[in-house]
Image: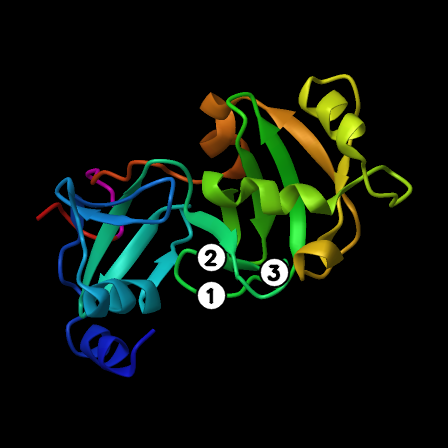
Amino acid sequence: MDAEVLAALARWPAVPAVYGWLALTARGQWRLRGERIGNAAIVAFIARNYALDGFGRAYFQNGPQRVYVDLESAPWIWQSSGAGHGLLAHTGTVPRHLARAALLDDGRLALVTDLGPGTVDDRDAARVLHALCDAGGRSLDEAAVERWLQGRQEACLSPRALGLEGARVPIERLSARRLAEHFGFDPAPRATADDPSGPPS
């Protein structure tokens, strides 16, 4: 996080958190009360100061105030880096290690990296498919990919093909409705009486 943000946190550690104002779309766009944030400097500031807490809640640390984020999809949105076949998070952060992968029943791909759980931006999904392989590490041809999409064949992801570390990861099949529960994050954080981050603003 930015040095000035950390300094503000140290100076004012008990500022109440904000809920329900900031949202992240499935394509990695920030929305403030429903309106897209288009200012590049603000977007970059949010990205630098974005994280997950120990309860699986995404937040933006705005100086001393924590702003929790409603998630249309997941805490991280994976996008093509544009350099080879590497991945970037929507914040520009580079993940390093692939731990899990899932094909959701709505067609989306979910990946868990060292940063945490996220879904692949639908505009970049085709670029991720080149990393599909069988259990022996052999790349899948077009017919095999089609069989996998139809549920007639299993597949793995090769982290190396995505510029990541780790062993081949079997691709689970998962209900989109269970994504947050299965991967341990809160898609819509709200204040509670015993909330450690304080009462709602």
Residue 137 seen in render: yes
Residue 162's place in the image compared with 33, above or below, is below
91 sits to left or right of 114: left
108 sits to left or right of 169: left
At x 58%, y 58%, the residue is 114
At x 54%, y 26%, the residue is 107
Query: Is the C-beta separation of discs 2 and 3 under 8 Å?
Result: no
Q: Mark 1 packing: few (<14 Cα in 10 Å), some, or many (20+)? A: some
Q: What mark, if any, has residue 176 been given in the picture?
A: none
| Residues drawn in magenta | 192-196
Q: What mark, if any, has residue 89 been given in the picture?
A: 2
Label 3 residue SS: loop
149 sits to left or right of 144: left
Q: Position of residue 138 (x, y in %)?
A: 88, 43
Query: Is the C-beta separation of discs 2 and 1 under 8 Å?
Result: yes
At x 63%, y 58%, the residue is 85
Marks 1 and 3 sit apart, C-alpha to C-alpha, by 12 Å
User: Amino acid under label 1?
Assistant: Thr
User: Amino acid under label 2?
Assistant: Ala
Residue 121 seen in render: no
Q: Is residue 19 covered in magenta?
A: no
Q: Which of marks 2 and 3 is in front?
A: 3
Magenta stretch, main secondary structure class: loop
Residue 89's place in the image compared with 150, above or below, is below
Quadrant (top left, top right, bottom left, bottom right) of the N terminus: bottom left
Q: What mark, if any, has residue 86 been given in the picture?
A: 3
Q: Mark 1 points at which residue?
A: 93
Sequence order check, earlier mark of 1 and 3:
3
Residue 163's place in the image compared with 119, above or below, is below
Marks 2 and 3 sit apart, C-alpha to C-alpha, by 10 Å
